[in-house]
Amino acid sequence: MKFRVEHRQRSAESFSAHYYDIYCDDRLIAEYWHDYRGDDHGIRFLGRERSYPFRSSEEDYPLFGRAKDFLEGGGPEPLTLSKRAIAYLEKELDRADESSSRSG
């Protein structure tokens, strides 16, 4: 699986959230977001009704302390996903594939 992340156009408002599209092999799979400081952040997978804030107490979802633990680069550097974020996404996609193969 090859992942790619793209920063969406940011709102003109000060202190607005940042949104990113996450692709797997050129297929949009998720929306990642963080607040202006990077403290609060989470992910919403396409096709799932709820989003997953990373400051959750649920054991199934890893706790990423801040956005910098999920994203790397930015500014003059290329924007990429951290190794830990890639591992998390791979696990989530495998989980979704297993679920759909059981139901289908």
Image: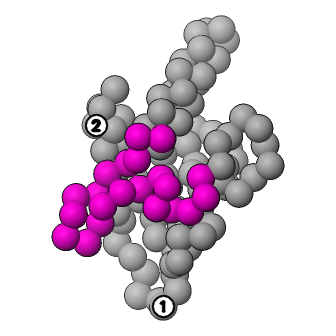
Is residue 73 found left or right of 87 in the rendered image? left
Question: Residue placed at 56% from the left, 62% from the top?
Answer: 66
Tag 2: amino acid? Asp
Q: Earlier in the sequence, mark 2 or mark 1?
A: 1
Q: Is residue 70 magenta?
A: yes
Question: Residue placed at 53% from the left, 36% from the top?
Answer: 88
Q: Is residue 46 above or below residue 12?
A: above
Q: Is residue 79 magenta?
A: yes
Q: Which residue is mark 1?
A: 14
If the image is split into quadrants, where does the C terminus sit?
Answer: top right
The stretch in magenta equals 64-84
Residue furthest right as drawn: 57
Q: Tell me where residue 55 sits by quadrant.
A: bottom right
Q: Secondary structure at mark 2?
A: loop
Q: Is residue 14 above or below residue 2?
A: below
How many neighbours does mark 2 have within 10 angstroms: few (below 14), some (14-19), or many (20 or more)? Answer: few
Question: Residue placed at 48% from the left, 91% from the top?
Answer: 14
- As measured in the structure, the alpha-carbon distance from the residue carrying label 2 to the one carrying label 1 is 31 Å
| Number of numbered tags placed on the structure image | 2
Is residue 87 found left or right of 8 in the rendered image? right
Is residue 10 found left or right of 13 in the rendered image? left
Question: Residue placed at 34% from the left, 72% from the top?
Answer: 9
Residue furthest left as drawn: 76
Q: Is residue 28 visible?
A: no
- Percent coordinates x, y for residue 41 in the rendering: 59, 62
- Percent coordinates x, y for residue 2 in the rendering: 30, 32
Q: Which residue is mark 2?
A: 26
Tag 1: amino acid? Ser
- Percent coordinates x, y for residue 69 in the rendering: 49, 55
